[in-house]
Image (cartoon, helix red, strand yellow):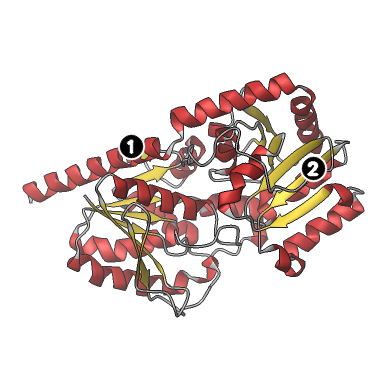
Protein backbone atom coordinates (compact mmCIF):
# COMPACT_ATOMS: atom_id res chain seq x y z
CA UNK A 1 0.00 0.00 0.00
CA UNK A 2 1.27 3.47 -0.83
CA UNK A 3 0.74 5.77 2.16
CA UNK A 4 1.15 9.55 2.33
CA UNK A 5 1.68 10.90 5.83
CA UNK A 6 1.04 14.65 6.06
CA UNK A 7 2.57 16.30 9.14
CA UNK A 8 2.94 19.98 8.44
CA UNK A 9 4.85 21.09 11.56
CA UNK A 10 5.86 17.84 13.30
CA UNK A 11 8.74 16.43 11.31
CA UNK A 12 9.94 12.95 12.25
CA UNK A 13 13.46 14.35 11.85
CA UNK A 14 13.07 17.14 14.42
CA UNK A 15 15.02 17.24 17.67
CA UNK A 16 12.58 16.56 20.51
CA UNK A 17 11.91 18.81 23.46
CA UNK A 18 11.32 22.12 21.71
CA UNK A 19 8.11 24.10 22.03
CA UNK A 20 6.59 22.48 18.94
CA UNK A 21 8.44 19.15 18.93
CA UNK A 22 7.09 16.35 21.07
CA UNK A 23 4.79 13.37 21.00
CA UNK A 24 3.37 14.00 17.54
CA UNK A 25 6.86 13.89 16.03
CA UNK A 26 7.50 10.56 17.77
CA UNK A 27 4.16 9.16 16.64
CA UNK A 28 4.68 10.07 12.97
CA UNK A 29 8.25 8.79 12.97
CA UNK A 30 7.61 5.46 14.65
CA UNK A 31 4.36 4.67 12.86
CA UNK A 32 5.94 5.48 9.49
CA UNK A 33 8.96 3.31 10.26
CA UNK A 34 6.83 0.37 11.39
CA UNK A 35 4.55 0.56 8.34
CA UNK A 36 7.56 0.77 6.03
CA UNK A 37 9.08 -2.32 7.66
CA UNK A 38 5.88 -4.16 6.78
CA UNK A 39 6.45 -3.43 3.11
CA UNK A 40 4.30 -0.34 2.68
CA UNK A 41 5.58 2.59 0.59
CA UNK A 42 5.49 5.49 3.06
CA UNK A 43 6.24 9.15 2.33
CA UNK A 44 6.01 11.77 5.09
CA UNK A 45 5.28 15.28 3.81
CA UNK A 46 6.44 17.95 6.26
CA UNK A 47 7.17 21.65 5.88
CA UNK A 48 10.65 22.77 4.92
CA UNK A 49 11.98 24.79 7.87
CA UNK A 50 15.61 25.19 6.79
CA UNK A 51 17.40 26.22 3.63
CA UNK A 52 19.93 23.39 3.74
CA UNK A 53 17.50 20.51 4.10
CA UNK A 54 17.56 17.99 1.25
CA UNK A 55 14.35 17.50 -0.68
CA UNK A 56 14.00 13.91 0.53
CA UNK A 57 15.51 12.07 3.52
CA UNK A 58 15.26 8.37 4.29
CA UNK A 59 14.06 7.06 7.68
CA UNK A 60 15.07 3.75 9.28
CA UNK A 61 12.94 0.99 7.84
CA UNK A 62 12.54 2.58 4.42
CA UNK A 63 10.07 5.46 4.85
CA UNK A 64 10.98 8.79 3.22
CA UNK A 65 10.54 12.36 4.46
CA UNK A 66 9.79 14.93 1.74
CA UNK A 67 10.25 18.60 2.61
CA UNK A 68 7.46 20.80 1.31
CA UNK A 69 8.09 24.46 0.40
CA UNK A 70 5.29 26.29 2.18
CA UNK A 71 6.15 29.59 3.80
CA UNK A 72 9.65 30.74 4.68
CA UNK A 73 12.31 28.00 4.91
CA UNK A 74 12.90 28.65 8.61
CA UNK A 75 11.42 27.73 11.96
CA UNK A 76 7.92 29.19 12.35
CA UNK A 77 5.68 28.66 15.42
CA UNK A 78 3.00 26.16 14.47
CA UNK A 79 0.18 28.57 15.30
CA UNK A 80 1.58 30.94 12.66
CA UNK A 81 1.57 28.33 9.88
CA UNK A 82 -2.12 28.62 9.02
CA UNK A 83 -1.67 31.12 6.12
CA UNK A 84 0.81 28.73 4.45
CA UNK A 85 -1.49 25.71 4.31
CA UNK A 86 -2.95 26.53 0.86
CA UNK A 87 0.60 26.42 -0.53
CA UNK A 88 1.23 23.14 1.29
CA UNK A 89 -1.98 21.70 -0.15
CA UNK A 90 -1.12 22.93 -3.64
CA UNK A 91 2.21 21.11 -3.41
CA UNK A 92 0.41 17.89 -2.47
CA UNK A 93 -2.03 18.38 -5.33
CA UNK A 94 0.95 18.32 -7.71
CA UNK A 95 2.82 15.55 -5.90
CA UNK A 96 -0.02 13.04 -5.56
CA UNK A 97 -0.61 12.55 -9.31
CA UNK A 98 3.05 11.59 -9.74
CA UNK A 99 2.84 8.87 -7.09
CA UNK A 100 -0.83 8.47 -6.25
CA UNK A 101 -1.16 7.25 -2.65
CA UNK A 102 -3.77 4.67 -1.72
CA UNK A 103 -4.49 6.59 1.48
CA UNK A 104 -3.50 9.94 2.99
CA UNK A 105 -3.05 10.12 6.77
CA UNK A 106 -3.12 13.70 8.05
CA UNK A 107 -1.65 14.63 11.44
CA UNK A 108 -2.97 17.77 13.17
CA UNK A 109 -5.72 20.04 11.91
CA UNK A 110 -3.62 22.11 9.50
CA UNK A 111 -2.30 18.94 7.90
CA UNK A 112 -5.94 17.97 7.45
CA UNK A 113 -6.52 21.20 5.52
CA UNK A 114 -3.57 20.55 3.24
CA UNK A 115 -4.48 16.88 2.78
CA UNK A 116 -8.01 17.78 1.66
CA UNK A 117 -6.64 20.20 -0.94
CA UNK A 118 -4.28 17.56 -2.29
CA UNK A 119 -6.45 14.46 -2.04
CA UNK A 120 -10.04 15.50 -2.68
CA UNK A 121 -9.67 16.29 -6.42
CA UNK A 122 -8.17 12.82 -6.91
CA UNK A 123 -10.72 10.98 -4.80
CA UNK A 124 -8.01 9.68 -2.46
CA UNK A 125 -9.33 8.59 0.97
CA UNK A 126 -8.12 10.67 3.94
CA UNK A 127 -7.62 9.45 7.51
CA UNK A 128 -7.31 12.21 10.11
CA UNK A 129 -5.49 12.15 13.45
CA UNK A 130 -5.89 15.47 15.27
CA UNK A 131 -3.41 14.75 18.12
CA UNK A 132 -4.98 17.74 19.90
CA UNK A 133 -8.31 19.52 19.44
CA UNK A 134 -8.84 23.24 19.41
CA UNK A 135 -11.93 23.01 21.61
CA UNK A 136 -9.86 21.41 24.37
CA UNK A 137 -7.02 23.90 24.03
CA UNK A 138 -9.42 26.85 24.09
CA UNK A 139 -11.22 25.48 27.16
CA UNK A 140 -8.01 25.13 29.15
CA UNK A 141 -5.95 28.07 27.87
CA UNK A 142 -8.67 30.66 27.35
CA UNK A 143 -7.20 34.00 26.26
CA UNK A 144 -3.72 32.45 26.21
CA UNK A 145 -4.70 30.17 23.32
CA UNK A 146 -2.70 31.36 20.31
CA UNK A 147 -4.45 29.12 17.78
CA UNK A 148 -6.01 30.82 14.75
CA UNK A 149 -9.65 31.74 15.29
CA UNK A 150 -10.64 29.48 12.40
CA UNK A 151 -9.24 26.33 14.02
CA UNK A 152 -12.35 24.86 15.67
CA UNK A 153 -14.55 25.45 12.64
CA UNK A 154 -12.01 23.84 10.32
CA UNK A 155 -11.57 20.88 12.67
CA UNK A 156 -15.33 20.38 12.57
CA UNK A 157 -15.30 20.38 8.75
CA UNK A 158 -12.34 18.00 8.58
CA UNK A 159 -13.81 15.60 11.13
CA UNK A 160 -17.13 15.40 9.34
CA UNK A 161 -15.66 15.31 5.85
CA UNK A 162 -12.76 12.87 6.05
CA UNK A 163 -13.12 9.14 5.51
CA UNK A 164 -12.10 8.23 9.06
CA UNK A 165 -10.94 9.98 12.21
CA UNK A 166 -8.32 8.08 14.12
CA UNK A 167 -8.60 9.13 17.78
CA UNK A 168 -5.81 8.31 20.21
CA UNK A 169 -7.97 7.95 23.34
CA UNK A 170 -11.59 7.55 24.41
CA UNK A 171 -11.71 11.08 25.83
CA UNK A 172 -11.14 12.40 22.31
CA UNK A 173 -14.14 10.44 20.99
CA UNK A 174 -16.41 12.47 23.28
CA UNK A 175 -14.83 15.73 22.14
CA UNK A 176 -15.31 14.73 18.51
CA UNK A 177 -18.96 13.93 19.16
CA UNK A 178 -19.41 17.47 20.48
CA UNK A 179 -18.01 18.67 17.15
CA UNK A 180 -20.66 16.66 15.34
CA UNK A 181 -18.40 13.82 14.19
CA UNK A 182 -20.47 10.59 14.25
CA UNK A 183 -19.12 7.84 16.51
CA UNK A 184 -19.33 5.37 13.63
CA UNK A 185 -16.76 7.49 11.77
CA UNK A 186 -14.16 7.28 14.56
CA UNK A 187 -11.67 4.53 15.41
CA UNK A 188 -9.59 4.57 18.60
CA UNK A 189 -5.95 3.56 18.19
CA UNK A 190 -3.56 4.73 20.93
CA UNK A 191 -0.04 6.03 20.62
CA UNK A 192 2.79 3.58 21.27
CA UNK A 193 6.13 3.12 22.95
CA UNK A 194 9.30 1.34 21.87
CA UNK A 195 9.42 -1.45 24.45
CA UNK A 196 12.83 -2.46 23.13
CA UNK A 197 14.32 0.94 23.87
CA UNK A 198 12.34 1.56 27.07
CA UNK A 199 12.71 -1.46 29.32
CA UNK A 200 13.31 -2.27 33.00
CA UNK A 201 16.86 -2.47 34.23
CA UNK A 202 18.49 -0.06 31.76
CA UNK A 203 21.89 0.82 33.28
CA UNK A 204 21.66 4.28 34.85
CA UNK A 205 25.34 5.09 34.35
CA UNK A 206 25.70 8.70 33.23
CA UNK A 207 22.48 9.95 34.81
CA UNK A 208 22.63 12.84 37.33
CA UNK A 209 23.83 11.75 40.75
CA UNK A 210 21.01 11.35 43.28
CA UNK A 211 21.06 13.95 46.07
CA UNK A 212 17.97 12.90 48.01
CA UNK A 213 16.44 9.65 49.20
CA UNK A 214 13.71 9.73 46.53
CA UNK A 215 13.77 10.97 42.95
CA UNK A 216 10.83 12.23 40.90
CA UNK A 217 11.12 12.82 37.16
CA UNK A 218 8.95 15.04 34.99
CA UNK A 219 9.68 15.33 31.29
CA UNK A 220 8.35 16.65 28.01
CA UNK A 221 8.14 19.95 26.21
CA UNK A 222 8.96 22.89 28.47
CA UNK A 223 5.63 24.69 28.14
CA UNK A 224 3.22 25.99 30.78
CA UNK A 225 0.42 23.51 30.12
CA UNK A 226 2.67 20.61 31.12
CA UNK A 227 2.13 21.68 34.73
CA UNK A 228 5.70 21.47 35.98
CA UNK A 229 4.82 24.20 38.47
CA UNK A 230 2.44 21.74 40.13
CA UNK A 231 5.30 19.26 40.48
CA UNK A 232 7.53 21.95 42.02
CA UNK A 233 4.82 22.94 44.51
CA UNK A 234 4.21 19.31 45.45
CA UNK A 235 7.86 19.05 46.43
CA UNK A 236 7.20 21.38 49.37
CA UNK A 237 5.20 18.54 50.94
CA UNK A 238 7.66 15.79 50.07
CA UNK A 239 10.78 15.84 52.24
CA UNK A 240 13.91 13.92 51.23
CA UNK A 241 12.75 14.06 47.60
CA UNK A 242 14.27 15.68 44.52
CA UNK A 243 12.64 16.61 41.21
CA UNK A 244 14.34 16.43 37.84
CA UNK A 245 12.67 18.18 34.90
CA UNK A 246 13.86 17.08 31.47
CA UNK A 247 12.92 18.99 28.33
CA UNK A 248 13.29 22.31 26.60
CA UNK A 249 16.39 23.80 24.97
CA UNK A 250 19.93 22.48 25.51
CA UNK A 251 21.21 23.06 29.06
CA UNK A 252 23.38 25.98 28.01
CA UNK A 253 20.33 27.87 26.72
CA UNK A 254 18.00 27.32 29.67
CA UNK A 255 18.78 30.74 31.14
CA UNK A 256 17.10 32.35 28.15
CA UNK A 257 13.99 30.13 28.32
CA UNK A 258 11.03 31.96 29.95
CA UNK A 259 9.37 28.83 31.31
CA UNK A 260 12.64 27.61 32.80
CA UNK A 261 13.16 30.95 34.55
CA UNK A 262 9.58 30.90 35.85
CA UNK A 263 10.00 27.43 37.32
CA UNK A 264 13.32 28.28 38.96
CA UNK A 265 11.82 31.42 40.51
CA UNK A 266 8.93 29.34 41.82
CA UNK A 267 11.32 26.77 43.29
CA UNK A 268 13.24 29.57 44.99
CA UNK A 269 10.09 31.15 46.46
CA UNK A 270 8.85 27.73 47.58
CA UNK A 271 12.08 26.93 49.39
CA UNK A 272 12.89 23.85 47.26
CA UNK A 273 15.44 25.31 44.83
CA UNK A 274 18.11 22.96 46.16
CA UNK A 275 15.90 19.97 45.28
CA UNK A 276 14.83 20.99 41.75
CA UNK A 277 17.05 20.49 38.73
CA UNK A 278 16.21 21.50 35.17
CA UNK A 279 18.15 19.29 32.78
CA UNK A 280 17.14 20.89 29.49
CA UNK A 281 17.04 18.77 26.36
CA UNK A 282 18.05 15.16 26.95
CA UNK A 283 19.26 12.89 24.17
CA UNK A 284 16.38 10.47 23.44
CA UNK A 285 18.86 7.60 23.68
CA UNK A 286 19.48 8.58 27.33
CA UNK A 287 15.84 8.85 28.33
CA UNK A 288 15.34 5.18 29.32
CA UNK A 289 18.26 5.40 31.75
CA UNK A 290 16.98 8.69 33.16
CA UNK A 291 13.49 7.24 33.67
CA UNK A 292 14.99 4.13 35.24
CA UNK A 293 16.91 6.29 37.73
CA UNK A 294 13.64 7.67 39.14
CA UNK A 295 11.39 6.17 41.80
CA UNK A 296 8.36 7.68 40.14
CA UNK A 297 7.49 9.65 37.00
CA UNK A 298 5.25 12.64 37.72
CA UNK A 299 3.03 13.91 34.87
CA UNK A 300 0.96 16.95 35.89
CA UNK A 301 -0.32 18.71 32.74
CA UNK A 302 -3.51 20.74 32.90
CA UNK A 303 -4.66 18.82 29.82
CA UNK A 304 -3.07 16.11 27.70
CA UNK A 305 -4.49 14.86 24.38
CA UNK A 306 -2.63 11.57 24.85
CA UNK A 307 0.72 11.71 26.63
CA UNK A 308 3.56 9.41 25.65
CA UNK A 309 5.64 9.99 28.81
CA UNK A 310 3.46 7.73 31.01
CA UNK A 311 3.89 4.94 28.45
CA UNK A 312 7.65 5.34 28.48
CA UNK A 313 7.66 5.14 32.27
CA UNK A 314 5.40 2.09 32.26
CA UNK A 315 7.61 0.36 29.70
CA UNK A 316 10.55 0.97 32.06
CA UNK A 317 8.51 -0.51 34.95
CA UNK A 318 8.45 2.83 36.79
CA UNK A 319 5.14 3.85 38.44
CA UNK A 320 3.36 7.02 37.30
CA UNK A 321 1.40 9.69 39.14
CA UNK A 322 -0.54 11.67 36.54
CA UNK A 323 -3.33 14.19 36.33
CA UNK A 324 -6.74 12.72 35.53
CA UNK A 325 -7.03 14.18 32.03
CA UNK A 326 -7.25 13.08 28.39
CA UNK A 327 -5.16 10.11 27.41
CA UNK A 328 -3.91 9.55 30.97
CA UNK A 329 -7.33 8.09 31.74
CA UNK A 330 -6.67 5.31 29.24
CA UNK A 331 -3.01 4.59 29.92
CA UNK A 332 -2.63 4.97 33.69
CA UNK A 333 -4.70 2.45 35.62
CA UNK A 334 -5.37 4.10 38.98
CA UNK A 335 -4.03 1.96 41.80
CA UNK A 336 -2.55 -0.59 39.37
CA UNK A 337 0.14 1.08 37.23
CA UNK A 338 0.15 4.34 39.17
CA UNK A 339 -2.22 6.99 40.47
CA UNK A 340 -4.50 9.55 38.84
CA UNK A 341 -5.00 12.89 40.62
CA UNK A 342 -7.25 15.91 39.97
CA UNK A 343 -5.73 18.79 38.06
CA UNK A 344 -4.50 21.54 40.37
CA UNK A 345 -5.06 19.55 43.56
CA UNK A 346 -1.71 19.98 45.28
CA UNK A 347 -2.74 17.97 48.33
CA UNK A 348 -3.95 14.99 46.30
CA UNK A 349 -0.81 15.06 44.15
CA UNK A 350 1.55 15.11 47.12
CA UNK A 351 -0.45 12.43 48.93
CA UNK A 352 -0.42 10.12 45.91
CA UNK A 353 3.33 10.56 45.49
CA UNK A 354 3.91 9.92 49.20
CA UNK A 355 1.82 6.76 49.10
CA UNK A 356 3.75 5.34 46.14
CA UNK A 357 7.16 6.34 47.52
CA UNK A 358 6.37 4.86 50.94
CA UNK A 359 6.17 1.27 49.73
CA UNK A 360 8.92 -0.35 47.70
CA UNK A 361 6.76 -3.43 47.21
CA UNK A 362 3.94 -1.24 45.84
CA UNK A 363 6.33 0.48 43.43
CA UNK A 364 7.57 -2.84 42.15
CA UNK A 365 4.01 -4.13 41.69
CA UNK A 366 2.94 -0.98 39.84
CA UNK A 367 6.06 -1.10 37.70
CA UNK A 368 5.47 -4.73 36.76
CA UNK A 369 1.82 -4.00 35.89
CA UNK A 370 2.88 -1.02 33.80
CA UNK A 371 5.38 -3.06 31.82
CA UNK A 372 2.77 -5.75 31.17
CA UNK A 373 0.27 -3.14 29.96
CA UNK A 374 2.85 -1.60 27.63
CA UNK A 375 3.63 -4.99 26.11
CA UNK A 376 -0.02 -5.95 25.76
CA UNK A 377 -1.49 -2.75 24.30
CA UNK A 378 1.03 -0.08 23.46
CA UNK A 379 3.82 -1.48 21.30
CA UNK A 380 4.26 0.21 17.94
CA UNK A 381 3.44 -3.14 16.36
CA UNK A 382 0.01 -3.11 18.03
CA UNK A 383 -0.50 0.52 17.01
CA UNK A 384 0.41 -0.25 13.40
CA UNK A 385 -2.01 -3.19 13.45
CA UNK A 386 -4.85 -0.84 14.35
CA UNK A 387 -3.84 1.82 11.83
CA UNK A 388 -3.47 -0.75 9.04
CA UNK A 389 -6.98 -1.99 9.75
CA UNK A 390 -8.31 1.56 9.37
CA UNK A 391 -6.42 2.03 6.10
CA UNK A 392 -7.81 -1.22 4.75
CA UNK A 393 -11.35 -0.19 5.61
CA UNK A 394 -11.18 3.19 3.91
CA UNK A 395 -9.37 1.92 0.82
CA UNK A 396 -11.85 -0.96 0.44
CA UNK A 397 -14.69 1.57 0.62
CA UNK A 398 -12.89 3.69 -1.99
CA UNK A 399 -12.62 0.65 -4.29
CA UNK A 400 -16.34 -0.01 -3.89
CA UNK A 401 -17.14 3.60 -4.75
CA UNK A 402 -14.93 3.38 -7.85
CA UNK A 403 -16.66 0.20 -9.02
CA UNK A 404 -20.11 1.74 -8.54
CA UNK A 405 -19.07 4.87 -10.43
Q: Can residue 55 be seen at all in this image of the molecule?
A: yes
Q: How many marks?
A: 2
Q: Nearer the viewer, residue 323 or 368?
A: 368
| Residue 180: percent from left, percent from top | 41, 45
Among the two numbered marks 1 and 2 on one chain, the one whose residue lies closer to the N terminus: 2
**Mark 1–mark 2 contact, CB under 8 Å?**
no
Q: Name the disc covering residue 160, or none.
A: none
Residue 208 is left or right of residue 191, and the answer is right
| Residue 136: percent from left, percent from top | 56, 49
388 w.r.t. 73: above or below? above
Q: Nearer the viewer, residue 119 or 212?
A: 212
> Helix or strand or loop: what does disc 2 sit on?
loop
Residue pictured at 55% horizontal, 55% vertical: 22
Q: Can residue 342 be seen at all in this image of the molecule?
A: no
> Helix or strand or loop: what does disc 1 sit on?
helix
The image quadrant that residue 318 belongs to is top right
Residue 54 is left or right of residue 291, and the answer is left
| Residue 325: percent from left, percent from top | 61, 39
The residue carrying mark 2 is 210
40 w.r.t. 331: above or below? below
Residue pictured at 66% horizontal, 60% vertical: 248
Which mark is nearer the camera, 1 or 2? 2
| Residue 135: percent from left, percent from top | 54, 51
Q: Dot 1: few (<14), some (14–19), or many (≥20) neighbours within 10 Å? A: some
The residue carrying mark 1 is 385
Residue pictured at 64% horizontal, 21% vertical: 365
150 w.r.t. 23: above or below? below
Amino acid sequence: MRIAMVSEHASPLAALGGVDAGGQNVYVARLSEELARRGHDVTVYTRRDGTRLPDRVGLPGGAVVEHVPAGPPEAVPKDDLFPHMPAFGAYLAHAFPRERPDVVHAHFWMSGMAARIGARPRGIPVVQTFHALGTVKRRHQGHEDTSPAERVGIERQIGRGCDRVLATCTDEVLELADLGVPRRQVSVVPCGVDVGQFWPGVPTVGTPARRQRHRLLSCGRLVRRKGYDQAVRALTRLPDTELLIAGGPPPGLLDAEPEARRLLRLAERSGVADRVRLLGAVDPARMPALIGSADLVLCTPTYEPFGIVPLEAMACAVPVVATDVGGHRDTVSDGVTGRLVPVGDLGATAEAVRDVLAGERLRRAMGTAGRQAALARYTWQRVADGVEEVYQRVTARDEIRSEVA
